[in-house]
Amino acid sequence: MSVEHTPLSIEPEGTALPIGVNTLNGQSMDVYSEPFELPCDPAKKAICESHLESGVQGEMLDDFWMAGCDFDKSLKEGLIRIQFSCPGRSGLLKRCRLTLTQYDKEGNKLNDGTVNRRIES
C-alpha cells in the first residue's frame, strides 16, 4: 500500500525501516524505507521479486542519490523517506515498471523515478 498522505511512522510500531544516514554539506539526514508495494497476483509478484533480487533497486538508489533526491526538503526535515513500488511488468513490452518515490514526513510525494528495462521471465 502506498504511503502517500500517511505520516511517517517508524518500526516497530509503524512501517518505516531506518536504513542509514546520509550527509549533505555537513548536515546529516536519517534515511527511511517504507515496505515494497508489489503486485498481489502471485505470478506477477514472483517476477518482481526475482527482478529485485538482480539488484535493480540498488541501481535506482544510486541514480536517486545523484540526480533524483529532493535534498532541499530533506534537509529541512532532517530525513529522506523512500518507497519502491511496482504494478508488475508491462504486458506488451515486457518492461519493468519499478518506481522509487520520495515522500516527506507527512506523506506528500516529492518526486519519483522509474526504471525502463526489458525483463525476461
Image (tube, rainbow, N blue to C red):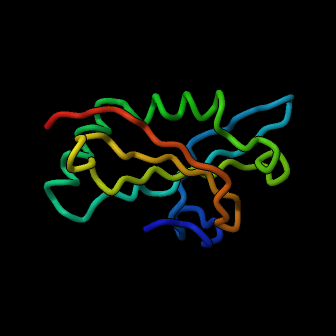
Residue 110 image-quadrant placement: bottom right
- Residue plotted at (36% across, 46% down): 97
- In the displayed structure, does residue 77 sit left or right of residue 94? right
- In the displayed structure, does residue 31 sit left or right of residue 119? right
Residue 60 sits above or below residue 2 on the image: above
Residue 98 sits above or below residue 10 on the image: above
Query: Residue 112: x, y in percent?
Result: 57, 48
- Residue plotted at (27% across, 37% down): 51
Is the C terminus in the top left, top right, bottom left or bottom right quadrant? top left
Is the N terminus in the top left, top right, bottom left or bottom right quadrant? bottom left
Q: Going by the picture, which residue comes out furthest to the front?
A: 92
Query: Residue 18: x, y in percent?
Result: 58, 49
Query: Residue 98: x, y in percent?
Result: 39, 45
Residue 68 image-quadrant placement: top right
- In the displayed structure, does residue 69 sit left or right of residue 97? right
- Residue plotted at (69% across, 45% down): 30
Foreground residue among 105 and 68: 68
